Amino acid sequence: MDVDTRLLRYFAAVAEEGHLTRAAERLYVSQPALTKQIRQLEKQLGVQLFVRTPAGMTLTGPGETLAARVPAILDDLAEALRQTRHTARRAEQVLRVGFLAGAAGEATQEIIAAFGRRRPGWRVEMRHASWSAPTADLTAGDVDVALLPLPLPGQEELRVEVLLTEPRCVVLPAGHPLAEREGLAFRELWDEPFVAAPVAAGTWRDYWLATDAREGREPRIGAVADNPDDWLSAVAGGHGIALAPESAARYYARPGVAYRPLTGVAPSSVAVVWRPAADADPLVQDFVGCCLERRRLD
Amino acid sequence: MDVDTRLLRYFAAVAEEGHLTRAAERLYVSQPALTKQIRQLEKQLGVQLFVRTPAGMTLTGPGETLAARVPAILDDLAEALRQTRHTARRAEQVLRVGFLAGAAGEATQEIIAAFGRRRPGWRVEMRHASWSAPTADLTAGDVDVALLPLPLPGQEELRVEVLLTEPRCVVLPAGHPLAEREGLAFRELWDEPFVAAPVAAGTWRDYWLATDAREGREPRIGAVADNPDDWLSAVAGGHGIALAPESAARYYARPGVAYRPLTGVAPSSVAVVWRPAADADPLVQDFVGCCLERRRLD
DNA sequence: CACGTCCATGCCGCCAGGTTATGAGGACAG
DNA sequence: CTGTCCTCATAACCTGGCGGCATGGACGTG
């Protein structure tokens, strides 16, 4: 009778979506796996939670009862884990900062140094954010604040202050014909295969495929990568090309890939991001302050 | 990052006990299993929760933070599951009654009939309670009310009204020399092997071994059983003898075993039991009422 | 009537959690 | 100082359950 949180998450997703299939997509599991888990939950409780209709899954009375309470429980749990991590970092006098790509570029070191001056004794720990879910560490409370390229999935629930804006460029295999050129227009790349982020990355993936600058054409996906290494390897290996912020040319230079200026896509920004719950956290605010002092908007 | 409830239970147990080893006993898992799980929790959180000393495990600051919140979360979850089951049964117009052995004996049918008259349209569903944890179904909300022999583990947290008291007798293999006798004194059984409940049953196990009437002598355990079938088979198979309420002679008669009257042990009682939370539940109270009308205390 | 959209089922590979056996280190008594 | 007992950690192995794929079956819709 040990209902574990996975079951609760699954249940909550199905209850919310009303469809096994759609919930399965959202949870990134197969539909049969979900079927089985939901049945198991029902079996463990000895209660039918859903009525199966050809149109989907609708909650029964008892199902409603459960659905009304589960989200709060999961939130409580998440909050407790956040607090725990938080206490741990405060006890060690560490501020943990998530980042992706080159973060705020050259300014990053300055920001950290400034923070060190403002908070003697404190240490800044930089942590790579996951590529497929750049804000996950932030919302999970694993980092206190983050320096991330925009746009971000779930950006509305976070505080975001833009620090700098830079054009996006294109990353090509060194031997690629287009790498001969000094500058490119995005429309020339429409038919090229791209190395994309996982589907799980959602709008993030779309943004770096620049789907909105393709006038409706489907991008070709040559490979999927969820970290910079795989991503560069895929490009170097000729599986596709990719977009990147210009600073990537400095932070992710490596033999076999070439960075070229690009026109026809919106620039990308780097922002400092934190959870609204940290609005009152003087430490986070000090760090944000250090960032804003060095803000550079072009 | 999907901390499941098992981990939380484990953590709570270790936090409370202050010892991995003791917590492992309480949870009925091996100590290495606990070690691994606790380490995994720490790894998932990226936080050290305990400091390991030769004397045991003591919480770190972050550990305290977590320990302060986990029990409430687990309680919330348990409560939500209870509610769910509860709604389900109310929706089906079912009152679920747990029982063990012969329940309230011949009175049981009368009680159910009386309840049927008081609540037309409602159905009573009888459910075997687990032998090793007779009140588990009750506290988990799986049954609304129960008819159980006393004493019960965790009895203080429950409402208990005694319905009848009956002497305990002894169950012997049919061919056993003592089965020739018409009546026995408990001290004659001190050296006999007993068929006992699992260690997990705690005081319940002790009670049916009548450890308090042995003047300090350790009982001999011939076999362990956690349900009436195994139990009777073990007795019939000559692995040991056992104590039982007298009514068991009628409800668990079978070839190969003999029931004989016994002196020198306290009698056992059967009570109607419910959770304090059901004090205000008219349905449960009606059932309790039906029980008390037929109360018979000798 | 064929098709699309649901959910259910069967089969299989794999990992996580369990177990037992053993190690390692500190505390304490003799 | 050394043996013993307590603690927790480690190693090797086994198994149940989760998840994935492929497929089936039921209902609604064009």
Image: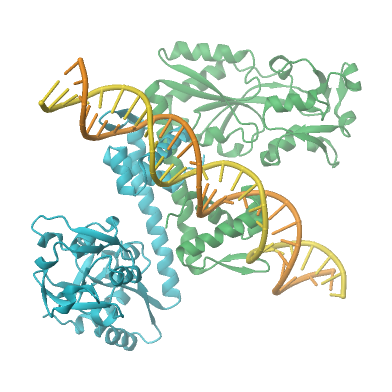
Chain colours: A green, B cyan, C yellow, D orange
Residue B98 percent location from the top left of the image: 33, 72
- The front one of A125 and B257 is B257
Tell me: residue B74, above or below residue B165: above
Which quarter of the figure has residue B195? bottom left
Which quarter of the figure has residue A178? top right
Tell me: residue A240, above or below residue A20: above
Look at 42% across and 66% down and name the residue there.
B85
Residue B117 percent location from the top left of the image: 32, 89
- B131 displayed left or right of A175: left
Residue A139: tell me if it is visible. Answer: yes
Which quarter of the figure has residue B93? bottom left
- B179 displayed left or right of A208: left
Residue A89 percent location from the top left of the image: 42, 26
Look at 25% across and 66% down and name the residue there.
B240
Tell me: residue B253, above or below residue A142: below
- B62 displayed left or right of B188: right
- The front one of B197 and A160 is B197
- The front one of C25 and A41 is C25
Residue A55 percent location from the top left of the image: 68, 67
- The front one of C5 and C26 is C26
Residue B104: tell me if it is visible. Answer: no
Look at 15% across and 63% down and name the residue there.
B210
